[in-house]
Image (spheres, grey):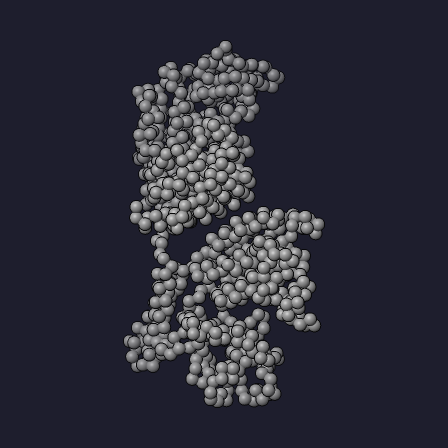
């Protein structure tokens, strides 16, 4: 694993985090650092996941944690990009749900099942 | 191996093959429907399994090859194609042939079998890997033991450092999901924000609701390498028994308590407030949303499993009916018939001895029971006509392909029930009619397009109840009957005279004349002139009637009116002189008086003015040459036949009667005007009037 593939680009209205390659136990540590940086910018965070090729439980946890962080800091955090691999793994792990967690007061949970979206 | 088992297998296999045929034809129309593929696969699998069990090894190994191909289809590795359906239908016919060969002891046509199998193998993309699935495959596996599907609740809470030992919880979950219908809910309540997160620890835990036949051991096997590094609890929440399926599933609160997420005391307290329990528990902060979600998922999962099981049980119950040979049923119906007769006699006796109130009440009781018994006994013989309909699907498919036509068969009212005997006797006439529609009615695609009609034709087969009859309609959107051609042919065959003026309706009826065919050439399908007259005979043999309607260029519609049952009918009992007769009540319109004066007014013509309309009547006394003089006031029973009203003159109308039909026996088969006999309450015999024939005879004489 030659380091995580992640690009944090600061836009006017938001911070865009673009992932590519894997999001697994091998690189979640590094990804966490980058995500913390992204949140530190104090702007809404957009996580673009379309480029992810593989994800494991730690990756799923990381995404979930991003959401928690966003709620805790009052910074909107959205997940964009359709990714079948991610959707499939999340389904196996039982992540998708109809109602978010206790933190999810504004219904921004990344695992929220939208009726018009297939998954995630 | 006892013959009885072999016979049971053959019966079952025949049913399965019929079902298979239906599924295959449906699959041809909806190739993307994986449910149908599954149905085909399961049917093949059952035939294979039970075939092997009962020593039909040839069937088992043959079917195994087909099943192998369907396994690929089921897994999406092979698409459903016309070719596949054709082959499968051929395979189905081979299995049937093998069954029949086993019955007659003749060797099956191995060559044909191999042809079919070769066809299947050609379909398989990579036959090399398949390892030539042949007889050498050994004994096919046993039919799956019907272990009940048990539903487990599995809470899997790995210790935080589980990732360090290289365990991937995802693969464990995947393994579980392979065991059966499974719902997984990850519980995220321990999740941290990024600052507090150690990304290499596990914060999630899972609630898994799994329904599986594999048993507890299979679940334990999944977790065998992680038992030391996780908290695992496996609970049976539904043991697959049918009894439990009846009720719904536990309430949310019960689930939470069972899981230890909530104490009973807490729940009681909450229940004091009247709100949705989940919301209450949430608001109170006793449990978190994920816990509730997870519990709700369990609730839904078990509910669904139980519903499915209940549906299955119901269908199993339907299938677990006893097989009774038709002879026994016939005997039962005969006995009930006798009983109805005796009961009529009992009622009569009771009527005469009115003083004995006790006897009257017993007679009434017996009458009520007999009626129930009769209805039930007749009901047992009732079968839905759908099985016959689905046979025709194949007929239409094969014949239209042979003739290069595109015809679709649509059906309606397949669940309409008819007496078993009636259904059996209906088969041939329907085959004739449908063959005719395919051959003469529906045009070739080119002709149809030229006429501005859709390329493929439709034959619609419908059955519907109408009073004590069933109407069966066969409608095609073909060319319609060619009135001129029928006329010319009828003149040529001297059925009608050249100058005869006939209404279209009468001309249509000519197609039922013996030996009548307008087809220019004899095809393998029809044109030999045997057919429609056979149809008419068969339908009349069932005491039914047949009606034709046709519109040139638009199609033909043939309607068969068939009585529900052949055994017992409601009828009207009448008397002429000392003799009594019955006629089917369904035909009777009304009864009116006929005085001598009215006869005189007719001036020798048998016509009667009924509400300003002339109704012809037939004096039965004269027709049957019954001795004696008619009473001064006779009665006319006006019957409805083919849209006309005709009266039958009798001395007295006695009343309604439950008529148990007895055939007249061979000696009297030639007697016209009688369709059978029945035994009356006093033990005497009454003849059943064959009203249509009487009309025809009278018409001919006039």
Q: In the visual, does B458 lie left or right of B577?
A: right
**Visible in this render: residue B195?**
no
Which of B1/B574 is in front?
B1
Q: Residue, x 32% and y 48% (percent of image)?
A: B5
Residue B107 image position (x, y, % from top left): 41, 45
Q: Residue, x 44% and y 19% (percent of image)?
A: A58
- Residue B623's place in the image compared with B48, above or below, is below
- Residue A92's place in the image compared with B322, above or below, is above
To which quarter of the image does residue B503 belong? bottom right
To which quarter of the image does residue B488 belong? bottom right
Residue B145 image position (x, y, % from top left): 33, 39
**Visible in this render: residue B140?**
yes
In the rendered image, which quarter contains the C terminus of chain B? bottom right
Which of B445/B305 is in front?
B445
Residue A117 image position (x, y, % from top left): 54, 31
Which of B656/B197 is in front?
B656
């Amino acid at each position: 694993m030659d380091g995580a593939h992640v690009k944090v680009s600061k836009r006017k209205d938001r911070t865009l985090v673009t992932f590519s390659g894997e999001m697994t136990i091998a690189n979640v540590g590094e990804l966490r650092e980058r995500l913390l940086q992204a949140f530190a910018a104090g702007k809404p965070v957009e996580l673009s996941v379309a480029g992810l090729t593989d994800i494991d439980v730690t990756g799923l946890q990381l995404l979930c944690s991003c959401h928690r962080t966003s709620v805790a800091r009052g910074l909107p955090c959205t997940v964009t990009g359709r990714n079948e691999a991610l959707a499939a793994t999340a389904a196996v792990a039982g992540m998708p749900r109809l109602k978010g967690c206790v933190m999810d007061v504004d219904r921004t949970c990344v695992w929220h099942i939208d009726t018009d979206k297939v998954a995630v | 191996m006892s013959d009885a088992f072999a016979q049971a297998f053959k019966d079952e296999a025949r049913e399965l093959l019929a079902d298979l045929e239906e599924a295959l034809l449906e699959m041809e129309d909806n190739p993307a429907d994986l449910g149908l593929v599954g149905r085909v696969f399961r049917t093949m699998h059952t035939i294979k399994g039970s075939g092997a069990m009962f020593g039909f090894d040839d069937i088992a190994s043959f079917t195994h090859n087909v099943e192998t191909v369907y396994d690929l289809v089921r897994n999406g590795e092979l698409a459903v194609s016309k070719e596949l359906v054709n082959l499968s239908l051929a395979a189905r016919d081979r299995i049937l042939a093998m069954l029949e060969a086993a019955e007659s002891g003749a060797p099956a046509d191995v060559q044909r079998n191999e042809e079919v199998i070769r066809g299947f193998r050609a379909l398989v993309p990579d036959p090399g890997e398949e390892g030539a699935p042949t007889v050498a495959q050994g004994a096919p596996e046993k039919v799956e033991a019907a272990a009940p599907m048990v539903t487990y609740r599995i809470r899997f809470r790995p210790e935080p450092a589980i990732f360090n030992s290289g365990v991937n919880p995802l693969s464990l979950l995947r393994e579980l999901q392979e065991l059966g219908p499974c719902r997984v809910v990850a519980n995220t309540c321990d999740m941290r924000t990024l600052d507090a997160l150690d990304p290499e620890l596990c914060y999630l835990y899972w609630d898994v609701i799994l329904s599986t036949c594999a048993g507890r051991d299979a679940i334990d096997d999944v977790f065998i390498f992680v038992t030391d590094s996780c908290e695992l609890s496996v609970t049976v929440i539904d043991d697959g028994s049918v009894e439990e399926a009846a009720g719904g599933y536990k309430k949310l609160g019960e689930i939470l308590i069972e899981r230890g997420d909530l104490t009973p005391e807490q729940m009681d307290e909450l229940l004091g407030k009247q709100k949705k329990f989940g919301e209450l528990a949430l608001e109170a902060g006793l449990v978190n949303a994920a816990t509730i979600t997870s519990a709700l998922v369990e609730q839904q999962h078990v509910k669904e499993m139980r519903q499915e099981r209940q549906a299955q049980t119901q269908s199993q119950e339907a299938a677990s009916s006893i097989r009774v040979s038709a002879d026994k049923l016939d005997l039962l119906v005969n006995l009930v018939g006798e009983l109805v007769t005796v009961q009529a006699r009992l009622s009569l006796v009771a009527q005469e001895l009115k003083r004995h109130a006790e006897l009257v009440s017993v007679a009434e009781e017996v009458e009520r029971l007999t009626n129930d018994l009769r209805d039930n006994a007749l009901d047992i013989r009732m079968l839905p006509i759908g099985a016959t309909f689905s046979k025709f699907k194949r007929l239409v498919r094969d014949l239209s392909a042979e003739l290069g036509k595109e015809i679709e068969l649509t059906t309606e009212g397949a669940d309409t029930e008819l007496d078993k005997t009636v259904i059996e006797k209906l088969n041939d006439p329907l085959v004739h009619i449908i063959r005719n529609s395919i051959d003469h009615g529906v045009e070739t695609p080119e002709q149809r397009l030229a006429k501005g009609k859709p390329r493929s034709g439709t034959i619609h087969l419908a059955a519907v109840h109408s009073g004590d009859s069933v109407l069966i309609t066969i409608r095609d959107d073909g060319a319609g009957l060619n009135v001129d051609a029928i006329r010319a042919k009828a003149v040529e065959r001297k059925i009608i005279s050249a100058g005869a003026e006939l209404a279209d309706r009468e001309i249509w009826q000519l197609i039922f004349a013996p030996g009548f065919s307008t087809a220019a050439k004899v095809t393998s399908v029809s044109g030999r002139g045997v057919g429609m007259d056979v149809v008419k005979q068969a339908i009349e043999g069932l005491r039914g009637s047949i009606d034709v309607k046709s519109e040139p260029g638009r199609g033909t519609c043939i309607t068969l009116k068939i009585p529900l049952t052949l055994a017992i009918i409601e009828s009207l009992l009448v008397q002429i002189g000392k003799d009594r007769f019955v006629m089917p009540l369904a035909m009777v319109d009304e009864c009116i008086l006929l005085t001598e004066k009215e006869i005189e007014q007719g001036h020798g013509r048998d016509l009667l003015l009924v509400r300003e309309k002339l109704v012809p009547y037939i004096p039965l006394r004269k027709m049957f040459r019954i001795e004696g003089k008619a009473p001064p006031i006779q009665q006319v029973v006006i019957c409805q036949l083919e849209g006309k009203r005709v009266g039958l003159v009798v001395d007295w109308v006695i009343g309604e009667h439950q008529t148990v039909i007895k055939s007249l026996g061979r000696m009297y088969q030639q007697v016209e005007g009688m369709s059978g006999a029945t035994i009356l309450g006093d033990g005497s015999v009454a003849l059943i009037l064959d009203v249509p024939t009487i009309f025809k005879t009278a018409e001919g004489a006039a």
